[in-house]
Amino acid sequence: MDENTRVFVISTAAELAGMHPQTLRQYDRMGLVSPGRTPGRSRRYSMRDVARLREIADLGAEGVSLEGIRRILALEDTVRALESRVGDLEAALADELLNRPGRRVFAAGSAGDVISMRAGTRTRRSNQMVIWRPLDK
């Protein structure tokens, strides 16, 4: 079972969150928490919903109004969605950079010049030996 599985009836979720079931109904009407619904229209809460209810209770205990709580939760949801989107874009960019056809790699030639190479190729190493001899004067 993951944290998004909606298994708790309203009385269990209320007990886990330390609230009265009527408070959960009010928060549902206000849009602070959105439980799932069964075919019979009864509410089902997930662990994520219970954690959100606890966060609402903590913010309320700190003196934040319900409208303030709604704005804080909306901003947190936006940040979470944007972080996820940034992660997706970073992964897509990394894939694009790795798989881009014609991607170029540079290497140093034996004379110190820059050689352009295709990705996945290697320079041939010369196994020739160079002997240094001083010039005769």
Image (tube, helix red, strand yellow):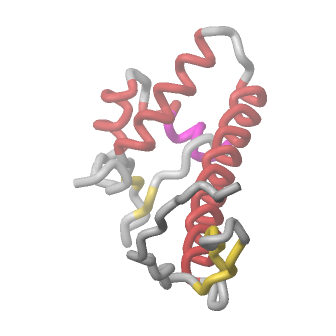
Tell which of 127 and 38 is nearer to you: 127
Q: Residue at x 29, y 47 (%)?
A: 8
> Outermost residue, left direction?
1
Q: Residue furthest bottom?
A: 101
Query: Which image quarter: residue 74?
Result: top right
Q: Nearer the viewer, residue 99 or 64?
A: 99
When asked about the image quadrant of residue 97, the answer is bottom right
Q: Is residue 61 left or right of residue 131?
A: right
Residue at coordinates 69% horizontally, 10% vertically from top-left?
63
Front residue of 98 and 129:
129
Rendered location of residue 37, percent (x, y): 43, 62
Q: Residue at x 64, y 54 (%)?
A: 81
Q: Quadrant of residue 109?
A: bottom right
* 103 in relation to 47, above or below: below
Count the marks.
0
Q: Is residue 86 left or right of residue 41?
A: right
Q: Quadrant of the C terminus?
A: bottom right
Q: Quadrant of the N terminus?
A: bottom left
**Mainly helix, strand or loop, the magenta region?**
helix
Q: Is residue 39 above or below residue 68?
A: below
In magenta stretch: residue 17: no
| x and y percentages locating residue 126 in the rendered image | 44, 77
Residue that protrudes farthest toward the front in the picture: 137
Identify the magenta region: 24-30
Q: Is residue 42 above or below residue 70?
A: below
29 in magenta: yes
Residue 90 image position (x, y, % from top left): 62, 61
